Amino acid sequence: MLYRFCAEHNIPHKKTGKLLVATDMLEEEYLEDVYRIAVENQVPGVETIDDNKVTQYEPNVKAVYALYVPTSGIIESTSLVDKLYRLAESYGAIFLVGNEVFEIEPEGKGFKVKIRSGTEVEIFKTRIIINAAGLYSDNIARMVNPESSYWMDPVKGE
Ligand SMILES: Cc1cc2nc3c(=O)[nH]c(=O)nc-3n(C[C@H](O)[C@H](O)[C@H](O)COP(=O)(O)OP(=O)(O)OC[C@H]3O[C@@H](n4cnc5c(N)ncnc54)[C@H](O)[C@@H]3O)c2cc1C
């Protein structure tokens, strides 16, 4: 779906495929688990390959085992975000950049949201909140419900 969107909107991208490599038995076990999850999630075309095939794909990589994911690729993410921003604006979305949400109060069937930019505070009402605050989404969840049991546990993806 994303490739089609990129093609339609001239967003630079390339379907390169991706190798996830194991360099020893321990990593091989880990990759087998990743493979099982990929199959469960119906990732198209994912396959396990041996060291010879890895060398064919990428002669500079030494591995005992690898997962090959043919649908992976790279994308110019700033162009993608810019396009999504402009499209959303054209459908009536209003972006309040540089504002921090610091308080949310349930009110009737909706919420009262307080935002600040420097010393300026604004309050608006909404029926729906979509919490997309990334690593801070647990803070937002607790603003809505202080009892929220949702805690962010960030891990570096290495
Ligand atoms: C160094 C680095 C490199 C990465 N490289 C890649 C890569 O090559 N490929 C890839 O697929 N992924 C990569 N990632 C991961 C990717 O960036 C994240 O998975 C993705 O950005 C998460 O998107 P998100 O929309 O959930 O959160 P975010 O992109 O973090 O967006 C959350 C937004 O909410 C805002 N926010 C938070 N709290 C508040 C608040 N109280 N009020 C108002 N706004 C708030 C934040 O300012 C932020 O703009 C990388 C991450 C890092 C850190």
Image (spheres, helix red, strand yellow):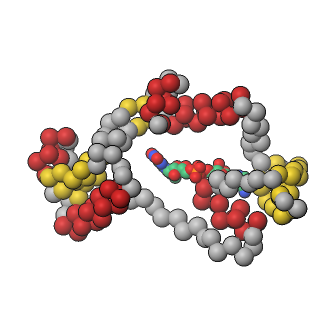
The reply to whether residue 27 is in sight is: no
> Horizontal and vertical percent for residue 54?
17, 47
90 to 43, vertically: above or below: above
36 or 119: nearer the viewer: 36
Residue 58's image quarter?
top left
> Horizontal and vertical percent for residue 6?
48, 29
130 or 157: nearer the viewer: 130
- Name the residue at 30% across, 61% down: 36
Q: In which quarter of the image is the C terminus?
A: bottom left
- Name the residue at 32% across, 36% down: 16
- Name the residue at 36% across, 52% down: 42
Residue 73's image quarter?
top left
> Horizontal and vertical percent for residue 26?
23, 69
The reply to whether residue 145 is in sight is: yes
63 to 33, vertically: above or below: above
Is 11 left, or right, of 120 in this rendering? left
> Horizontal and vertical percent for residue 101?
77, 55
43 to 36, vertically: above or below: above
- Name the residue at 74% across, 54% down: 129
Is 119 left, or right, of 136 in this rendering? right
Q: How many labels does the image show?
A: 0
